Image (tube, grey):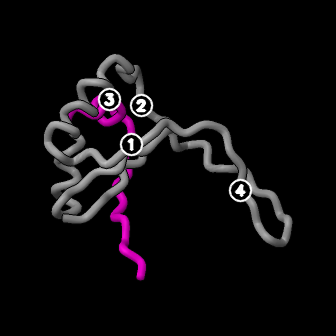
Amino acid sequence: MSEYLLLMHVDAVDEAAAAWPAYLDGLAEAGRLRGGSSLGDGACFRKDGAVRPSTDHLAGFIRIAADSLEDAGSCLAGNPVYEAGGTVEIRLLLEDE
């Protein structure tokens, strides 16, 4: 089983904040939840000192276990951002050596 990130974008309309506990509890009960968090303000840094704005379209992330990208996609049911018509980006976490 691999791990994936669900990256919640800030484009949902009328996201039901009250739905988060039940959604996260469901992922935990299924043995899929590996962590996650809302994202706050931040900054981008470069060694050469050039400052770039941080990405402002990401609201948070959830780390899950899934057998495939399609399996990870099945974990979107009940996600408050997804259910409100917002974007959830799914990314495979690679095991770097």
96 within the magenta span: yes
Tag 4 and tag 3, C-beta contact below 8 Å:
no
Counting from the top left corner in percent of width and height, residue 53 is at 73, 51
* Separation (CA) of disc 4 from disc 3: 28 Å
Q: Residue at x 23, y 61 (%)?
A: 69
Report the disc number at residue 87.
Answer: 1
For numbered disc 2, what is the local secondary structure?
loop
For numbered disc 3, what is the local secondary structure?
helix
To which residue does mark 4 refer? 44
* Separation (CA) of disc 3 from disc 1: 10 Å
Looking at the image, tell me whether mark 4 or mark 1 is earlier in sequence order. 4
Tag 2 and tag 1, C-beta contact below 8 Å:
yes
Counting from the top left corner in percent of width and height, residue 7 is at 42, 48
Q: Residue furthest right?
A: 49
Q: Residue furthest bottom?
A: 97
| Kind of residue sitting beneath label 4 | Cys
Q: Nearer the viewer, residue 93 or 78?
A: 93
Q: Residue at x 40, y 20 (%)?
A: 14
Tag 4 and tag 1, C-beta contact below 8 Å:
no
Q: Residue at x 28, y 51 (%)?
A: 64
* Separation (CA) of disc 2 from disc 1: 7 Å
Looking at the image, tell me whether mark 3 or mark 1 is earlier in sequence order. 3
* Separation (CA) of disc 2 from disc 3: 8 Å
To which residue does mark 3 refer? 80
Q: Nearer the viewer, mark 4 or mark 1?
A: 4
Q: Nearer the viewer, residue 87 or 37?
A: 37
Q: Which residues are magenta?
A: 77-97
Q: Nearer the viewer, mark 4 or mark 2?
A: 4
| Kind of residue sitting beneath label 1 | Thr
* Residue 70 placement, left or right of 5: left
Q: Nearer the viewer, mark 2 or mark 3?
A: 3
Q: Residue at x 52, y 43 (%)?
A: 58
